[in-house]
């Protein structure tokens, strides 16, 4: 009888952990659906939940950065983008977004440095290279005019 109770308890515990694992895997996909519907508050919560269960989920950090872009919170956006790049250094979308932040901050040397990495890794966003170059040139020209 004790053996049956022990086996039953073990099975219940296993089922509990399996259900937690299954529910946690859907946080990102649910969050992405909410993000696409522009329900950023609920999406943010689900991306944060995904990170709790999957700390290396660079996609959740990337989508959090996109939410902070919409909310115009550069500090949180940059923090999440840097986390994405720690987890996946070749993430071209995060590099592109970080270049734009650095340009908005007038940190041209950092923008150039990140742009070099972007040039190395771009595969799907290569068409943005010209846009970045134009922004860098225009920002440098504007900065020179402001100095004079």
Image (spheres, rainbow, N blue to C red):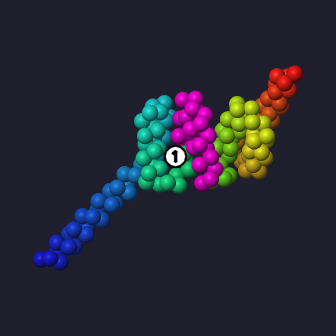
Residue range of the region highlighted in magenta in the rendering: 62-87
Residue 76: image x %, image y %? 56, 38
- Establish if 20 lies above or below 28: below
On-image quarter of the C terminus? top right
In the displayed image of the protein, which residue is found farthest to the left?
1
The residue lying at 75 percent from left, 42 percent from top is 110
Which residue position is annotated with label 1?
60
- Camera sees residue 4: yes
How packed is label 1: few (under 14 Cα within 10 Å), some, or many (20 or more)? Answer: many
Q: Quadrant of residue 78?
A: top right
Q: Residue 17: where, in percent of width, then height?
A: 33, 60
Magenta highlight on residue 95 = no
Q: Position of residue 116 (x, y in %)?
A: 78, 46
Quadrant position of residue 133: top right
Residue 49 spot, x, y in % from top left: 42, 47
Furthest residue in direction right, as rendered? 148
Q: Is residue 66 magenta?
A: yes
Which quarter of the image is occupied by the N terminus?
Answer: bottom left
Q: Indicate left or right for 145 with 52 as reference.
A: right
Front-most of residues 104 and 63: 104
Res 129 seen here = no
**In the displayed structure, does residue 92 sit left or right of residue 145?**
left
Magenta segment, prevailing SS (helix, strand or loop)? helix
Q: Nearer the viewer, residue 2 or 147?
A: 147
Q: Quadrant of residue 101?
A: top right
> In the image, what residue occupies the spot 44% across and 51% down?
52
């Amino acid at each position: 009888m004790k053996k049956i109770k022990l086996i039953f308890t073990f099975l219940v515990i296993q089922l509990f952990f399996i259900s937690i694992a299954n529910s946690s895997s859907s946080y990102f996909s649910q969050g992405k659906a909410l993000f696409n519907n522009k329900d950023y508050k609920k999406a943010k919560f689900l991306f944060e939940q995904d990170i709790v269960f999957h700390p290396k989920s660079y996609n959740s950090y990337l989508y959090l950065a996109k939410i902070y872009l919409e909310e115009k919170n550069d500090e949180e956006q940059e923090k999440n983008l840097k986390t994405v790049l720690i987890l996946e250094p070749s993430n071209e979308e995060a590099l592109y977004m970080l270049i734009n932040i650095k340009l908005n901050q007038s940190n041209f040397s950092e923008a150039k440095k990140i742009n070099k990495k972007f040039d190395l890794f771009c595969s799907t966003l290569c068409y943005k290279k010209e846009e970045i170059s134009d922004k860098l040139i225009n920002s440098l020209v504007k900065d020179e005019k402001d100095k004079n």
